[in-house]
Image: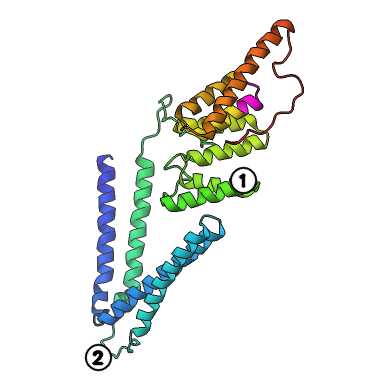
Amino acid sequence: MSGPLATTLTLVVFLGLAALAYAAWPLRSWRGEANEPQDDERTALEAEKIAALRALRELEADREAGHLLEADHAEMLERYEARAAAVLRRLDALQPAAPATPPAGPPPVPIPWSRQPVVLGGAGVAVLVFGVVLGILVTRYTTPAPVEGQPTAPAAPGPVALGDAPGGPGAARALPPEMLQGMLQAARSSLEAGRYPEAIAAYKAVLKREPRNVDAITHLGLILAIAGHAEDALEAFDKALQIDANYGEALWYKGSVLAEVKRDDAGAIAAWEQFVRGAASGPDREQAVARIREAKARLGSGAARLGGHPGSSPDGVGSEPAAPARP
């Protein structure tokens, strides 16, 4: 900041503070006696009552949006209602505020209009506004214009396709782990029941709070694959694998789309082999091993058919691509 600009802004701030002090000083004689302790307690309880009612409204909104399981909602509702009831009982226990009685004494001396609080407050606000406007004008007309040909700062990156980056426009406060798991479980239940719009809305709500949640990104990709958008689905799976290279469901669904829709057995084998390396012993791992053997067999038979019949497809012509199988 240049020297003249800093001096001007300092003067503006000083004038504004001086005007406010001048306007507020007469008001000190207008203050009544200090609030009774009971009044302070009543004020605190009123604020706590408002906060408790607001928490109940937000809890009900989360339940209606499907962000909470019924069990979690019932537990949190019981706790919030108990808190609100305790506050109301304490408010009822307080005695009603007694009307303030003016102290006996000589009649007040008339105050000149120039010393009225309204006049003084208005003068202070006017001086402060004048100072702010003056500071804006000084900043505007003293900032040097950009030199032609001077490089400018690079533009901010565009929005991420499946949720904003952390700290971006769509970022919000992080979800508690139990609430996050409840939202993911509700989204998966909607997906398994075929209620795809509900599942999409739930997964997007998760990504609004947790933009790098691989579960939500992967299952949005699965919904895209079911809808026949294979390229977009593969892009979603790759995005999830950039965050967690060994995320099993993303590897499984990627291999399924590559094998069943894109007819890319080599790419499917690579995805499934990575899935097998990170999977524990069990039915999912055995199924992946079996699908790897099938894909390798198709590659071998396809190469033999291509050697005898140039231009033929390894898997035949006209077959209808199916949605990826689920583990």
Amino acid found under the numbered disc labelled 1 = Glu
Q: Is residue 54 above or below residue 264?
A: below
**x, y percentage for residue 264?**
62, 21
Q: Is residue 14 magenta?
A: no
Q: Quadrant of the N terminus?
A: top left
Q: Bounds of the magenta span? A: 257-264
Mark 1 residue crowding within 10 angstroms, few (<14) / some (14–19) / many (20+): few
The residue depicted at 29 percent of the width and 59 percent of the height is 16
Q: Mark 2 or mark 1, which is nearer to you? A: 1
> Relative to 314, is 327 above or below?
below
Q: Could you tell me if the residues under marks 2 and 1 are in contact, i.e. CB atoms within 8 Å?
A: no
Pinpoint residue 47: horizontal percent, then vertical percent.
37, 71
Q: Residues within 10 Å of mark 2 (few under 14, many from 20)?
A: few
Q: Position of residue 265 (x, y in %)?
A: 61, 20
Disc 2 marks which residue? Answer: 103
Whichever of callouts 2 and 1 sits on the residue coming sooner in the sequence is: 2
Q: Furthest-right residue in view?
A: 318
Q: Which mark is residue 171?
A: none
Q: Within the image, what quadrant is residue 42 found in?
A: bottom left
Can residue 82 be seen here? yes
| Residue that label 1 marks | 192
Going 47% across and 32% down the picture, which residue do you hit? Answer: 281
Residue at the location (32% across, 65% down)? Answer: 124
Disc 2 residue type (three-letter)? Pro
Q: Secondary structure at mark 2?
A: loop
Q: Nearer the viewer, residue 140 or 273?
A: 273
| Residue 259 within the segment the image draws in magenta | yes
